[in-house]
Amino acid sequence: MEERIICLAELQYEYYFLGDHWKVVRGDNIKNISINSFYGYPFYIVFENIKEVSEQLITFISQHNVSLLDIFPVELILKDIVDNQQGYWLNLCLDFIIRMNCFSENIVKILTKTKDDKSFNQELRHRVRRIISNFEPKF
């Protein structure tokens, strides 16, 4: 079953989750992204549109009684951002994680790797430290 989860009409982006892969549609361009060979770039735009996207995701997870982490690849996107040392996107991803309250053990592990990584600026590393210390889930 194919159900649109996110729609950014002004940017012509639509996101569909199909179980083992995502279908990202931008205008006439369709990109199928396998969970096993993840490519996160098409998801980055979500973080620049956090208000609109978070409302859509909250509605979807409420209507379907599912966890955000079950339908949206936050952990994989975060890992992709950290692996590629993209400070701008990491900052926006942190805003998304906080707004959606979607912490997991894996998210905390990925963030822990960045708190001392000098490829990220000092302000961002300190922000990561604060977030980890304030919001670290009890496992």
Image (cartoon, rainbow, N blue to C red):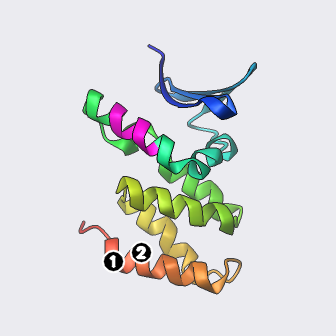
How many labels, in total? 2
Q: Extreme right residue here?
A: 29
Q: Are marks 2 and 1 in contact (CB under 8 Å)?
A: yes
Q: In 3D space, how far apart are the residues under numbered discs 2 and 1 (Cα atoms)?
A: 5 Å
Q: Residue at x 61, y 29 (%)?
A: 9
Q: Which mark is residue 3?
A: none
**Residue indicated by mark 1:** 134
Q: Is residue 30 visible?
A: no
The answer to whether 86 appears left or right of 18 in the picture is: right
Query: From what the image shows, is residue 12 above or below residue 41?
Result: above
- Amino acid marked by disc 2: Ile
The answer to whether 31 appears left or right of 4 in the picture is: right
- Give the quarter of the image for residue 10: top right
Residue bounds of the magenta highlight: 54-60
Within-10-Å neighbours for mark 2: few <14, some 14–19, many 20+: some
Query: From what the image shows, is residue 74 above or below residue 84?
Result: above
**Residue indicated by mark 2:** 131
Q: Residue at x 54, y 80 (%)?
A: 115
Q: Nearer the viewer, residue 110 or 128?
A: 128
Query: From what the image shows, is residue 113 above or below residue 19?
Result: below
Q: Is residue 26 visible?
A: yes
Q: Secondary structure at mark 2?
A: helix
